[in-house]
Structure formats: structure tokens, C-alpha cells
Amino acid sequence: MAASTITSERVEHELKIAFLMLEELDDNAELWEQMPDWEQVDWSLEWEQFLNFLDHILDAAYKNNQMTPDQQVKYHELIRQIKERMPIIERLRLTKPRVSVKT
């Protein structure tokens, strides 16, 4: 239902943010043990929001053929990078993505 209103511009924007989130995940993974609890919680909430956009915007657009061919390539790369980072996600006890990392 919501997928019908997803624009190409929105997909492009969310893809850019998604790759930035993965960079931030890498940065935070290195500093996680030194971060105060409140900062870990704050970032965990940001991660949850990212997962919602991943699920409800990007994955929905992908499944409904609402991505350009270039965006589909980027989406596949995003999923590949998420799969690569699963050990980090598990180590930090972050919520695992609900989308299939086998795309």
C-alpha cells in the first residue's frame, strides 16, 4: 500500500542514507565499548529507524519494481554490505535486518 507512493527520488535519497549508516556502523563498532550507555542506546534507536526505512521504503520499492536499474544495483550492493557486517551487528546486539540478505 505505502509502496505505491515511493518515488525514484525518495529511493535515491534513502540509498544514500543507507550507505552512510553502514559507514557509521563501522565507526561506532570501533568505539562501542568506550561509548557511554546513553550513546549506545541513542545509536541503537537510529539503527532501528534505518531498518524501518530499509524494510518499508527500499525493500518495498525493490519488491514492487519501483527502482531504476541503477538503484537496483545499489540496493544489491547495500544488501551485500549488510550481510558482510552481520558479525558486527550481532556483536553490538543490534536488531538484525528483516529484509533478506540473500537478495
Image (cartoon, rainbow, N blue to C red):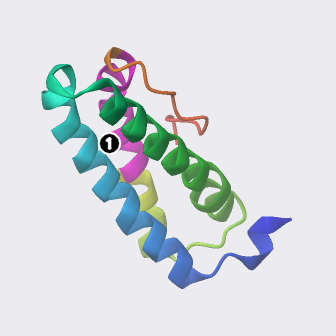
Give x and y (percent) for residue 20: 29, 57
- The residue wearing badge 1 is 81
Q: Where is residue 75 in the image (x, y as percent from the top left)?
A: 45, 58
Which quadrant of the rendered structure holds the N terminus?
Answer: bottom right
Determine the residue positioned at 37% across, 40% down: 43
37 within the magenta span: no
The residue located at (34%, 30%) in the rendering is 40
Q: Quadrant of residue 64?
A: bottom right
Q: Give the range drawn in magenta.
A: 78-90
Question: Which residue ends up furthest to the right in the rendered image?
Answer: 1
Depth check: give the residue in front, 10 or 62. 10
Image vertical order of residue 11 relative to residue 96, above or below: below
- Local packing at callout 1 (Cα closer than 10 Å; few below 14, some 14-19, many 20+) is some
Left or right: 24 as drawn, with respect to 51: left
Majority SS type along the magenta span: helix
- Residue 19: horizontal and vertical position, in percent? 32, 56
Q: Nearer the viewer, residue 94 or 43?
A: 43
The residue under the point 38% across, 63% down is 17
Looking at the picture, does residue 30 appear above or below residue 7?
above
Q: Inspect the image, locate mark 1, and give the three-letter code of the amino acid beneath it.
A: Gln
Quadrant hosting residue 5: bottom right
